Image: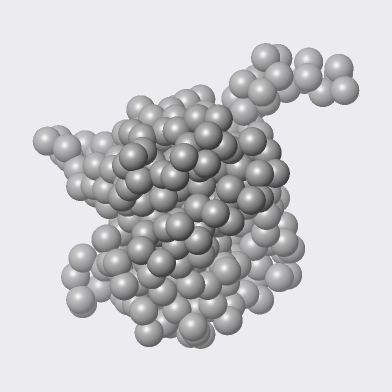
């Protein structure tokens, strides 16, 4: 249940915390107090009288819900603002391949509007015999490249025991689709203060991903973004997954966390990446995370879905143009002329 109070009613907030704090989970956000597992009859007369509204039908993932936290979460990192009215471009190779290569890809990403460099040093591969990532060396190379180009670093953490080590380097943790319900990993990153990009599992429902995000929030880390990266449907003959573009407005209605689109893993094929990305932007996503490579044929992983630098430029130009049109109602040149 969420008890909505008058602004600055600190006395009732304290009263509710004292009344329920030892037996129930109690969360406070400005003038809203969420108390898990109680009924209206459990409130004292003074608590009931102080409430301007009582919301009884709230999801289990209450901290992530709009009912508890109506305004958008805006995540601020050194070089990026994610969520709210902002649009954030993230790009980089699937895997960190070498010190030189990640720096080269950072240059391409930055030159085309990305403020966040993506890249995996620990790779969740379908086969144990496929390239597993460069490990800590990869993190070092990526940190250096991100710093050189004044970008934030986004990289996957796959195991609990690596969280501390990855935290030494990265600005944002990625939790991969396969680990979306690795609850112990979610709890561990939830105890850090590093933003988390949580990817929707390939068979996860909307409630599944929201509940997964709540494991992170439960630890005290509220800097969460949710990524749609394609789900499994009955047809994967022509695309790797199915981009659930409809989930963008659905998630935006239900949660205040930024919603990001990953068109690369959704499509699996370079030729489909840009149309899917643009559909995601048009649906109102807060950002894109895109895999790029200068020599996809020789990429260590996910080459078939990587965009070459000129292809990424095309995607990026169009994505920013759509975003401008959405926010100003005008094409970019017209909007710029009016400024
Ligand atoms: C990745 O980002 O390279 C990746 C493995 O993504 P996902 O977890 O969505 O498959
Ligand atoms: Mn990949």
Closer to us: 225 or 255: 255
x, y percent for residue 152: 64, 62
x, y percent for residue 150: 74, 63
Q: In this rendering, does residue 224 appear at all?
A: no
Above or below — where is 296 with respect to 121?
Answer: above
x, y percent for residue 258: 52, 43
Residue at the (50%, 53%) spot, across then down: 16
Above or below — where is 88 with respect to 301?
Answer: above
Q: In this rendering, does residue 201 appear at all?
A: yes
Closer to us: 4 or 116: 4
Q: Which image quadrant for residue 232?
A: top left
Q: How many marks?
A: 0
Closer to us: 267 or 19: 19
Residue at the (56%, 37%) spot, across then down: 50
Please indicate whether residue 197 sits to the left or right of residue 13 in the image. left
**Coloration of the structure image:** one colour
Q: Where is the C terminus found, in terms of image quarters?
A: top right
Residue at the (12%, 36%) spot, across then down: 234
x, y percent for residue 39: 32, 42
Q: Where is the N terminus found, in terms of image quarters?
A: top left
Please indicate whether residue 266 sits to the left or right of residue 112 in the image. left
Q: Which image quadrant for residue 322?
A: top right
């Amino acid at each position: 249940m969420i008890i909505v109070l008058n602004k600055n009613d600190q006395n009732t907030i304290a009263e509710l915390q004292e009344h329920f704090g030892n037996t129930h989970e109690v969360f406070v956000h400005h003038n809203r107090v969420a108390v898990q597992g109680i009924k209206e009859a459990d409130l004292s007369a003074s608590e009931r009288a102080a409430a301007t509204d009582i919301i009884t039908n709230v999801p289990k993932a209450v901290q992530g819900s709009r009912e508890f936290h109506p305004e958008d979460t805006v995540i601020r990192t050194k070089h990026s603002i994610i969520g709210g009215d902002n649009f954030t471009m993230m790009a980089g190779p699937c895997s960190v391949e070498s010190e030189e290569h990640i720096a080269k890809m950072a240059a391409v990403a930055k030159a085309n509007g990305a403020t966040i460099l993506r890249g995996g040093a620990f790779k969740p591969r379908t086969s144990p015999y496929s390239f597993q990532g460069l490990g800590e060396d990869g993190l070092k190379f990526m940190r250096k490249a991100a710093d050189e180009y004044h970008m934030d670093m986004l990289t996957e953490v796959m195991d609990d025991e690596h969280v501390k080590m990855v935290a030494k380097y990265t600005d944002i943790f990625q939790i991969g689709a396969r680990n979306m319900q690795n609850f112990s990993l979610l709890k561990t990153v939830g105890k850090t203060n590093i933003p988390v990009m949580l990817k929707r599992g390939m068979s996860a429902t909307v409630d599944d991903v929201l509940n997964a995000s709540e494991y992170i929030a439960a630890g005290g880390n509220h800097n969460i973004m949710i990524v749609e990266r394609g789900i499994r449907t009955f047809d994967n003959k022509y695309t790797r997954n199915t981009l659930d573009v409809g989930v963008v407005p659905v998630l935006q209605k239900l949660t205040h966390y930024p919603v990001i689109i990953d068109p690369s893993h959704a499509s699996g094929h370079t030729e489909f990446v840009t149309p899917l990305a643009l559909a995601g932007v048009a649906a109102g996503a807060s950002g894109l995370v895109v895999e790029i490579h200068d020599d996809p044929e020789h990429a260590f992983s996910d080459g078939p879905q990587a965009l070459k630098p000129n292809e990424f430029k095309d995607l990026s130009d169009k994505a920013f143009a759509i975003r401008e049109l959405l926010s100003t109602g005008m094409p970019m040149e017209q909007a710029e002329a009016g400024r």
